[in-house]
Amino acid sequence: MRVEIWSDIACPWCYLGKARFETGLAGFAHRADVEVVHRSFELDPKAPTAGALPVLDMLAEKYGVSREQAAEMEARVAGAAAAEGLDYRSDRIHGNTFDLHRLLHLARAYGVEDALLDAFYRANFAEARALGDPAVRTEIAVGAGLPADEVARVLADPGAYAREVRAEEREAAELGATGVPFFVIDRRYGISGGQPAEVFRQALERAHAEGGEPDRPAGAGGGTDAGAVCGEDGCAVPGE
């Protein structure tokens, strides 16, 4: 069984959704037979690569609210993160994530993609590190298991893995994903948002029980209610 997860390092619900999915996967009896593949998705492809904004300023500008109101929005997400045992800071920087996705493709080639994604999430949301700084990116990537010379090569070549990132972003659109996180199980079921762990476990159970030939997945809801998701218009919590 293969689970593909489209996500972005700048997406708080991707950070939470990954943790919730892994909890659901841990409760799945056939978890050893599940292959997890991470896919690229940029929430804000036009975000600056230099001179990036503090996230509270970005949120205030995007939603047309005060900085205090933006902080309240972030506090709600921080509460959800804490419930999953995750640290969450709102003094982080919002910036372009394209180079991070390129490094994740390099990490896939070395079998450490999941470790690097976790490291990027932790650096961004728990530590508020400046991921736009090439030195910081390099330190994190090498710490996750990538050779320093390969990291330097990719960061020095804007074309390295660029085609692969764009192809996965196009595929997300073809599958009906309008936001992330977006989970696709065996190309049969699509689940949108940072759903509760039990939703993921049940989806895995259903996919395993039904089996059959892979098909195009359902739309972004995949037959379930949409969870908290981030899209071009920002991040939202159902009912808020």
Image (spheres, rainbow, N blue to C red):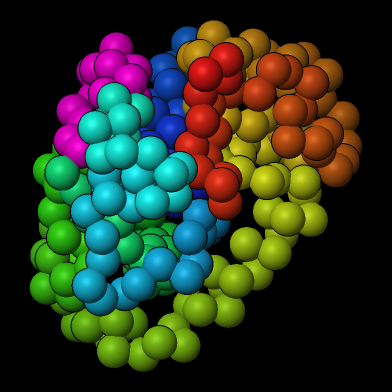
Q: Please report the bounds of the magenta region as a residue range.
A: 74-90
Q: Is residue 60 left or right of residue 140?
A: right
Q: Residue at x 18, y 36 (%)?
A: 89
Q: Relative to residue 79, is residue 14 depicted above or below?
A: below
At which x and y percent is residue 227?
58, 23
Q: Name the quadrant containing residue 74.
A: top left
In percent of width and height, residue 181 lies at: 54, 39
User: Quick one: quadrant of the N terminus?
Assistant: top right
In front of the other: 172 or 43:
43
Q: Quadrant of residue 12?
A: top left
Q: How many marks?
A: 0
> Is 162 positioned to the left or the right of 1 in the image?
left
Tell me the residue at 54%/9% (across/down): 198
Q: Which of 239/143 is in front?
A: 239
Membership of 36 in magenta stretch? no
Residue 5 sits in which quadrant? Answer: top right
Image point 69% across, 17% down: which residue? 225
The answer to which of 69 and 198 lies nearer the viewer is 69
